[in-house]
Amino acid sequence: DKGYYTAHIGKWHLGQMEGSHPIDQGFDDSLSMIGTLYLPEDHPKVVNARNYDDPIDNMVWTVGRFSASFNKSDDFEPDEYLTDYYTNNAIKVIEENKNRPFFLYLGHWAIHNPLQSLKSDYDLHSHSGNHALSVYSGMIEALDRSVGKIVKTLEENGLSDNTLIIFTSDNGGAGYIELPDINKPYRGWKLTHFEGGMHVPFLAKWPSQIKKGTRFLSPIHHIDIFHTIAAAARASVPKDRKLDGVDLIPYIQGKNKEKPHKTLFWREGHHQSVLHEGWKLIKADLPNKKWLFNLNEDPTERNNLDKAKPKKLSQLENLLTLHNAEQAEPLWPSVVDWPQLIDKHGGQDYEEGDEYIYWPN
């Protein structure tokens, strides 16, 4: 309604059925990821790192295709390495819409498995001595190149000062790619609610509104992005429903001295968490266990206080119960529970005493 052209490129993961597709959700154009490969497995320019012993990695490789779709078209093969392909199409969006307001959602597949790097990027990191790590590093190289190209394009077109860029990740590194320390110093992996799975980079650049070098340390959430970009566009948000999230800019600028969130919640079936004033509770039915951490004093979640702080535990459980009571029942309940080691990656054996939690999916 504010005259913005809107484009989606890359991962969607919210469904391709009628009503769920990006075009049905309001985007003017959508270059959608259909397959999971970055290049065909036998392409001369690609270096692969496949783990035949891991069921998740095997699944992604087995169902993988190198394909995309534009505005619900038939599937087709991109003409270059996927990260570069998305980047170059993002640059086209910027250059073709530089004379009008535009919004671009670029959902890079990188650095998700299957681990596939351009050989030219792999060679920059082949000294690591670990083949999978060198491939992973090459994938990060391509992602970094993407960010640089997009920022440069905005600058060359005189759009940089008045364009808000947000860069973030949907989760921490995955244990199933079997690389240690990728979430260091935090515990846990993608698929868990430990900080290694959820504490991700979140960077914003908007030279006319955000002072260079600003650091903001209070917890924020991806739910804040919607309100932040709507406010940036001076667009109103729907008033006929309850929406979580806040416009972050007044907080980052210091105009609002309060913290954006007193309490935040995460739910994945029975695997649920609450963060309240620095205290974090993780609980699950499988195993029937609770973890309570004071992140202000223990940001790497080493000291479980569930037995030592019963009143605090009860307080956070009550907050989670109230939050759950406000939620609609999921349309598609979980069908599988998958065990995840917290302090070991997927290639390391379970030993008596190792902590684990189940991922409902």
Image (cartoon, rainbow, N blue to C red):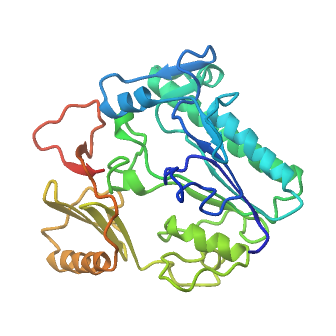
Q: With respect to residue 14, does 89 lie above or below?
A: above
Residue 253 location, x and y as percent? 66, 76
Residue 207 location, x and y as percent? 77, 65
Q: Quadrant of residue 211?
A: bottom right
Q: Is residue 187 left or right of residue 358?
A: right
Question: What's the residue at 67%, 48% (across, down)?
Answer: 71
Q: With respect to residue 24, does 60 lie above or below?
A: above
Quadrant, the N terminus: bottom right
Question: What's the residue at 31%, 37% (across, down)?
Answer: 345
In this rendered view, identify the residue nearer to me: 74 or 38.
74
Q: Quadrant of residue 175?
A: top left
Q: With respect to residue 105, does 176 lie above or below?
A: above
In this rendered view, identify the residue nearer to me: 190 or 185.
190
Among all residues in the image, which is located at the extreme left?
A: 352
Residue 48 visible in rendering? yes
In this rendered view, identify the residue nearer to me: 231 or 195.
231
Residue 174 location, x and y as percent? 39, 41
In this rendered view, identify the residue nearer to me: 178 or 69.
69
Q: Is residue 317 left or right of residue 60?
A: left
Question: What's the residue at 41%, 45% (across, down)?
Answer: 183
Question: What's the residue at 49%, 29% (across, down)?
Answer: 115
Label count reads: 0
Residue 179 visible in rendering? no
Residue 286 location, x and y as percent? 16, 54
